[in-house]
Amino acid sequence: MTYAQRLAAVTAERGRLCVGIDPMPAVLDAWGLPHTVDGLERCARGIVEEIGSSIAVFKPQSAFFEAFGSRGVAVLERVLGDIRAAGALSILDVKRGDIGSSMAGYAAAFLGDDAPTRADAITLSPYLGVGSLKPAIDAAVAGGQGLYVLARTSNPEGAEIQLADAGEVTVAQHVVDTIAALNPEADHAVGLVVGGTHTDSGCDLTAFNASVLVPGIGAQGGTIEALSKLFGQSLPHVLPTASRGVIGHGRDKLKANAHALVAEIASLLP
Ligand SMILES: O=C(O)c1cc(=O)[nH]c(=O)n1[C@@H]1O[C@H](COP(=O)(O)O)[C@@H](O)[C@H]1O
C-alpha cells in the first residue's frame, strides 16, 4: 500500500489529527518529569501509551531527541516502534534537505524497510532545489512511505524566503507546482507543509492533490475554524497537526485534549 492509501485508511477510522511529540523542557515540566533521557522516554512513550490506539498520526520532533545525543535518538527509535505497534502512522520531523548524494544518505537513515530510524513519512526542506530531493522521493515511493516538503511555514520569518519572487511565482508556489507535477508518478507520496497561522497562505493549492500537513494549530495561534477559509477546496487534503496544544498540559489532560481536537476537526472540516 502507498503512504497516501495508508493515511486515508487510518484517518477515516481515527479522525484527521496528527499529534506532535515535542518533548521540550516545558513539556517535561508539565508532565512532572526531569530533563533527562529517562524523562524524555517517559514523556514521549507515555504519549503513545495513552493515545496511540485512538489517534491516526504522530509527528515526533527529532530536535528534542537529538538534544540528548545518541541515547535520545535511541528513544526516538523506540517511539517510532511504539507508534507502528499501535497501528498509527509516524511523520518524523527532521526537515532534511541536501545535495543528491547526501540526500541518499538521509534516505537510508529514515526511509526503506532497513532504515534504522524508519518512519512512515519525514519532513524535508526544499531550499537546495526541489530536484535535490529526488533520492528521498525515489526511496519513499519504493518503500510505500511519504514525504512532507516545506512550502509555506507557520513562523513569521518564513515569508522573507518563501514569498520571495522566483520568476513568475513565489518560491512557495514554485515548490507547490513542482511537487504537484511530479506527484502522479510518485504515488502521491509527496505532501506539503503549509502553516495554519496565516490569513492567506499565499499558495494556490488547487492543482495539488496529496496530503498537506498544517502545523501551527494551538500554541502558535492557528485555529481549526480558520482552516476552511485558508484552504478552501483543498480542505480534504489537510492534516492538521498540534504539539504543545495537545501534549503541553501534562499526562492527565492528554487524552481529553487530543480527543476534543479530533471532535472539533470532525465537526468543522469535511
Ligand atoms: O514541519 C513542521 O512540522 C513544522 C513546519 C512549520 O511550518 N511550523 C512548525 O511549527 N512545524 C513543526 O510543528 C511543531 C509545532 O509545535 P506546536 O507549535 O507546539 O504545535 C514543531 O515541531 C515545529 O517544528
Image (cartoon, grey):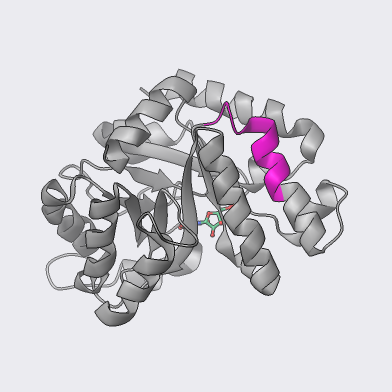
Query: Relative to 4, is 22 above or below?
Result: below
Q: Position of residue 169 (x, y in %)?
A: 17, 64
Instruction: Tell me if I can see residue 44 in this picture.
Output: yes
Percent of width and height locating residue 199: 41, 46
**In screen coordinates, is 53 left or right of 176?**
right
- Nearer to the camera, 180 or 233: 180
The C terminus: image quadrant = top left
- The structure residue drawn at horizontal position 40% and vertical position 46%, both measured from the top left corner, is 213
Up-down relation of residue 169 to residue 90 (above or below): below
Would you say the magenta stretch is mainly helix, strand or loop? helix
The magenta segment? 44-55
Q: Nearer the viewer, residue 216 or 125?
A: 125
Q: Residue at x 41, y 48 (%)?
A: 120
Residue drawn at (50%, 43%), measured in percent from left and top?
Answer: 241
State the quadrant of the N terminus.
top left
The answer to whether 35 appears left or right of 149 in the picture is right
Q: Indicate the position of residue 153 as horizontal and vertical percent values.
A: 42, 59
Is residue 47 found inside the magenta-colored segment of the image?
yes
Labels in figure, total: 0
**Which is more toward the observer, 123 or 270?**
123
Q: Quick check: is 92 in the magenta stretch?
A: no
